[in-house]
Amino acid sequence: MNEPTDPPTNAFNSHEPPPPHTQELEIPEQSPGSPHEQAEDVPNAHPSQTRKAFKQLYIILVAIGAIIGIFAAIGVVKLLGEWGLTDPPVRVEERQNEVP
């Protein structure tokens, strides 16, 4: 009688993930020292410097927006004057219909 053969080792069911390949993974070596010492090597690690940079960026963007807004407002006022939309309306007299 035929005995069942063992399945090959690389055959997996669809619900089973393959095992991790530790030979292909490169694990970086951790440098000795405390996490505090490692944080000093990261650029902009100090929150005060980052906050200062964002504050300067915010002020610059607000100033640019204000300048653009002033020029836009001046343009709108000039266009309204050119089209006559700032003049007072013309008075129209109503005539009463007289029946003879």
Image (tube, rainbow, N blue to C red):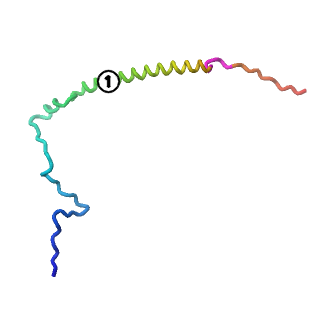
Residues drawn in magenta: 84-89
Which one is nearer the viewer's eye here, 33 or 8? 8
Secondary structure category for the residue under label 1:
helix
Which one is nearer the viewer's eye here, 75 or 69? 75
Q: Residues within 10 Å of mark 1 (few under 14, many from 20)?
A: few
Looking at the rendering, which quadrant does residue 35 occupy?
top left
Residue at x 35%, y 24% (from the top left corner): 58
Residue furthest to the right? 100
Which one is nearer the viewer's eye here, 72 or 42? 72
Q: Judge whether residue 17 is colored magenta.
A: no
Q: Judge whether residue 87 is colored magenta.
A: yes
- As displayed, is residue 71 above or below residue 19? above
Residue furthest to the left? 32
Q: Is residue 99 left or right of residue 65?
A: right
Image quarter where the N terminus lies is bottom left
Q: Which residue is mark 1?
A: 55
Looking at the rendering, which quadrant does residue 61 occupy?
top left
Residue at x 15%, y 48% (from the top left corner): 25
Type of amino acid under label 1: Lys
Q: Position of residue 72 (x, y in %)?
A: 49, 22
Residue at x 17%, y 54% (from the top left corner): 20
Q: Position of residue 8 (x, y in %)?
A: 16, 66
